[in-house]
């Protein structure tokens, strides 16, 4: 069952499926009308995982949402725009173990209707598609990792080229043994492509970042590795009009945890510059976007002093130095999985957030070209959760209750950061009761709602003046 609820200006909505657990956004794209499509999966240790896909208008208001499921677990991990009216996604399908799953390609129109679907497995065991792109001639190219039935970790990386209908033109794989992964792919000016990831290339057994250049027919031309860290992983790659390659990666340094590395290479893979950003906490880059021919922006997450993850957007100069860094986060963690540069020059990132309850919600954030929020974030919540909007609140807020509690006189209490109850009220039956908070000092609070059938749930509230 699916229900879509718009929650005022908070742009939050709930997807009800049979899965009780957390939601994560794994992929995002922008349509030609500037609407945004978010896709991902739900997760629970008690039940199977479901795919979900939803579309927002250019202002962040939800237009539609849908879920898909097989008999086992599923999750959309990558997607691309095939043309002005068709979206193609790649989903982990019938996921049982890392060595037993299918890759399913699904074609959607912009109203969320399924047009076509096809299984496109790679290898004898399990596989995962990390990225799916549309080539300049309309073909689809996917990359990721594959394992044999006897293995439990990535063993080989692959690239597969398909025609627009999903028929395989060719498949190539590289690497053997243990620890190969492909995280990103981009088409190059010569009609070929470059894959970025990490793998073990010598007897040390330490994974390092690499880029692999291939022809349009999948033949490998060269492979480059580089870096100063003890362990490195390339997660994103783009090419500028002069042929330069920009790579975003994560490097591990003793005493510094993971740091952000940005590298510029020439068209043959020779390093022009390599810059490291970060502090003594964990910093992870998830995507890189070309702002112009010489400047890029990186998108990812970093650990704040309380060890919670926050979103960051950073624009770099032509020599890799930071021009500005914008950060966004709540009272929990924001874990970003994918980010893009939108047509208006702003930035979009998707992932999961725990700032609004104990379970993760899928999360999409849109900024202007300077990394400033253009509106409020949007969230997809697990079934059974209630939502608060607006949040932060000043004088009052409303509670969006789950369907099972709408006709119930629920009890609500607000506790301060010390756990002391500072407000208690019985909510009238209805879907969006209003709660006064004008007498609460600025700060963060925990809102607890108790209803029928032993229902109890909590969310964080921020009060501002």
Image (cartoon, rainbow, N blue to C red):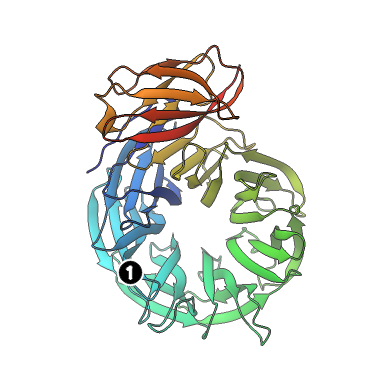
**x and y percent of residue 58 in the render?**
43, 34
**x and y percent of residue 15 in the render?**
31, 41
Quick one: label 1, few (<14), some, or many (20+) residues within 10 Å?
Answer: some
Asked if residue 282 can be seen in this view, the reply is: yes
The residue identified by callout 1 is 96
Tell me the residue at 61%/49% (across/down). 301
Asked if residue 246 can be seen in this view, the reply is: no
392 or 439, which lies in front? 439
Outermost residue on the bottom side: it is 203
230 with respect to 199 (left or right): right
Q: How many marks?
A: 1
Vertical order, 296 against 451 (above or below): below
Toward which corner of the image does residue 247 lie, by quadrant?
Answer: bottom right
Tell me the residue at 72%/71% (across/down). 230
Toward which corner of the image does residue 125 lie, by quadrant?
Answer: bottom left
Q: State the quadrant of the N terminus.
A: top left
Q: State the quadrant of the C terminus.
A: top right
**x and y percent of residue 430 in the render?**
28, 20
389 with respect to 384 (left or right): right
Vertical order, 256 against 22 (above or below): below
310 or 234, which lies in front? 310
Tell me the residue at 70%/62% (across/down). 263
**x and y percent of residue 39 in the render?**
39, 50
Tell me the residue at 32%/61% (across/down). 73
Vertical order, 387 against 211 (above or below): above
């Amino acid at each position: 069952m699916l229900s879509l609820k718009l929650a005022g200006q908070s742009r939050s909505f709930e997807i009800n499926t049979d899965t009780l657990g957390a939601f994560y956004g794994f992929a995002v794209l922008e349509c030609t009308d500037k609407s945004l499509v978010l896709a991902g999966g739900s997760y629970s240790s008690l039940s199977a995982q479901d795919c979900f896909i939803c579309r927002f208008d250019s202002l962040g208001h939800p237009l539609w949402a849908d879920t898909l499921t097989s008999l086992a677990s599923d999750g959309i991990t990558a997607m691309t725009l095939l043309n002005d009216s068709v979206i193609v996604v790649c989903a982990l399908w019938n996921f049982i173990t890392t060595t037993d799953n299918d890759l399913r390609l699904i074609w959607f129109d912009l109203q969320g209707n399924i047009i076509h679907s096809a299984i496109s497995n790679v290898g004898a065991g399990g596989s995962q598609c990390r990225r799916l792109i549309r080539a300049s001639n309309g073909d689809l190219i996917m990359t990721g990792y594959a394992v044999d039935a006897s293995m439990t970790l990535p063993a080989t990386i692959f690239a597969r080229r398909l025609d627009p209908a999903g028929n395989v033109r060719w498949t190539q794989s590289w690497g053997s043994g243990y620890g190969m992964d492909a995280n990103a792919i981009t088409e190059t000016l010569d009609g070929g492509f470059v894959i970025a990831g990490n793998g073990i290339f010598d007897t040390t057994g330490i994974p390092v970042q690499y880029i692999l250049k291939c022809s349009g027919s999948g033949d490998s031309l060269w492979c480059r590795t580089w870096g100063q860290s003890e362990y490195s992983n390339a997660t994103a790659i783009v090419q500028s009009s002069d042929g330069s390659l920009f790579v975003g990666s994560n490097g591990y340094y003793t005493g510094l945890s993971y740091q952000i590395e940005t590298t510029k290479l020439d068209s043959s893979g020779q390093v022009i510059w390599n810059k490291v950003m970060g502090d003594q906490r964990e910093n992870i880059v998830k995507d890189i976007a070309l702002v112009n021919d010489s400047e890029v922006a990186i998108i990812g997450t970093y650990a704040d002093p309380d060890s919670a993850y926050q979103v960051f957007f950073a624009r770099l100069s032509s020599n890799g130095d930071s021009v500005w860094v914008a950060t966004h986060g709540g009272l929990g963690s924001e874990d970003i999985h994918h980010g893009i540069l939108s047509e208006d020059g702003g930035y979009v990132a998707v992932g999961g957030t725990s700032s609004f309850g104990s379970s993760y919600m899928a999360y999409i954030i849109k900024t202007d070209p300077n990394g400033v929020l253009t509106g409020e974030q949007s969230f997809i919540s697990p079934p059974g959760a209630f939502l608060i909007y607006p949040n932060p609140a000043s004088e009052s807020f409303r509670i969006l209750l789950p369907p099972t509690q709408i006709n119930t006189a629920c009890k609500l209490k607000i506790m301060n950061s010390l756990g002391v109850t500072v407000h208690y009220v019985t909510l009238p039956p209805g879907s969006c009761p209003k709660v006064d908070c004008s007498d609460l000092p600025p700060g963060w609070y925990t809102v607890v709602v108790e209803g029928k059938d032993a229902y109890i749930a909590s969310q964080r509230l921020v009060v501002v003046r």
